[in-house]
Amino acid sequence: MRMIDIIEKKRDGFELTKEEIDFVIQGYTNGEIPDYQMSAFAMAIYFQDMTQEERVNLTLAMVESGDQIDLSGIAGVKVDKHSTGGVGDTTTLILAPLVASVGVPVAKMSGRGLGHTGGTVDKLESIKGFRVELDSKTFNELVNKNKVAVVGQSGNLTPADKKLYGLRDVTATVDSIPLIASSIMSKKIASGADAIVLDVKTGSGAFMKDIEGAKELAQAMVQIGNGAGRKTIAVISDMNQPLGYAIGNALEVKEAIDTLQGKGPKDLQELCLTLGSRMVYLGEQAESIEEAREKLIDVMNSGKAIDTFKTFLDAQGGDVSVVDDPNKLPKAAYTFEIEAKQSGYISEITANEIGIAASILGAGRVTKESEIDLAVGLVLNKKVGEAVQKGESLVTIHSNREDVQEVVDKIYHSYTISSEKVDQNPLVYDVIY
Ligand code: URA
Ligand code: CA
């Protein structure tokens, strides 16, 4: 086989065989196929798209390009959850102990990563003593015993995707449904999940700005997952404003603790129930989505969910007393209130700008090497649709620096106050099976 013939075949709109796709991914991973040919190939896919079968084969080829996590030593259907990323998204921290409380094993591998705030691992590390470096034997034992454990990323998962994603980034080929969908799904499948629930965000703070694009991506990922033998469901949710109130690492841990006890922000709780009930259903711990949802509400109200969170923290060395006394979490030196300049109704909070404001404070990483300040961030006191009086606080800034002018400017810029009450966007637009 020759790479040039495969590029030409895709360029002209023909369907590639499994053997051809394997040849490309193996050759690219081991360095035999150069970046310039792979760039041309990615661009051909960008214009010609891929059939469902090609997408599944591309995904599986990337899965096979590196290590795969073996979760077969863990009893039950292992369900993973993935979000395409938003601002102030605390759902993983809540969902892991929540669904574990009703018997779904959660073997979560989580990253630090770049972003407006840290990844789930960073957030958990704001709890004193918490360790994410677990060997695979301990990890499996903990999930079998407690139904939940979180481990930091290790091993050489999907090297083909790492290399290709880097190349797409500089060749204007990121924005392609088959390439995005196979990239995301290859990582989930290599992580060993039996079933997958996807949270595909849409809106100003999301990767997919419009609903049509989000739907198309969700459908592509669900088809790949099911085609690869992993039951997959996607929820399309709103990211036109941040989720919940808190944006920041320790601040989001506190918000997660509240939500696990049924005292969290309404939108965050609702999204957790929407995603969590699908996880419980796929994990075969309920006969229907409705039954799953009721079970989750029960464990929030009975205290079982927060007890599972405590057991999980304790098992990984974390200071459990923060749950009853969140004041023990890292705390910023200063707080500032951002007051509304006029009365009216909040009509818009651009999530993206709020995210950038949080990262300016130090809540997120700018480069892979930068240090995160776990204590800092923002707490929204007003969300879209709420009434506000001039002088009332829109946002509380938690900062370790006194000069926060740039952050203040960003916050004012992201909030729009109108004289008429506006309708809120729905939280969930669609569910794709
Ligand atoms: N996230 C990924 O992991 N891959 C993509 O291609 C785009 C977003
Ligand atoms: Ca939040």
Image: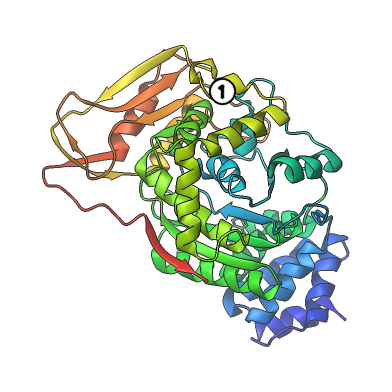
At mark 1, the secondary structure is loop
Query: Which color scheme did the rendering employ for the protein?
Result: rainbow
Q: Is residue 419 left or right of residue 35?
A: left
Front position in the image: 247 or 145: 145
Is 420 placed above or below 361 here?
A: below
x and y percentages locating residue 320 in the rendered image:
61, 23
Q: Residues within 10 Å of mark 1 (few under 14, many from 20)?
A: many
The residue at the point 71 percent across, 72 percent down is 228
Front position in the image: 414 or 378: 378
Report ligand 1 position as a quadrant.
bottom right
- Which of the 4 image quarters holds residue 135? top right
- Which of the 4 image quarters holds residue 226? bottom right
Is 330 placed above or below 191 here?
A: above
In this view of the protein, can residue 432 be seen by the observer? yes
x and y percentages locating residue 90 in the rendered image:
50, 40
Give the residue at mark 1.
373
The residue at the point 57 percent across, 57 percent down is 280
Quadrant in which the N terminus appears: bottom right
x and y percentages locating residue 393 in the rendered image:
25, 25
Q: Find the residue positioned furthest to the left.
A: 419
Is 163 placed above or below 258 here?
A: below
The residue at the point 60 percent across, 80 percent down is 48
Q: Is residue 36 left or right of residue 366?
A: right
- Which of the 4 image quarters holds residue 335? top left
In this view of the protein, can residue 170 be seen by the observer? no
x and y percentages locating residue 404 in the rendered image:
39, 20
Callout 1: CB less than 8 Å from ligand 2: no
Q: Is residue 325 left or right of residue 410?
A: right
Q: Amino acid at mark 1?
A: Asp
User: How many numbered marks does the figure carry?
Assistant: 1
The residue at the point 34 percent across, 18 percent down is 336
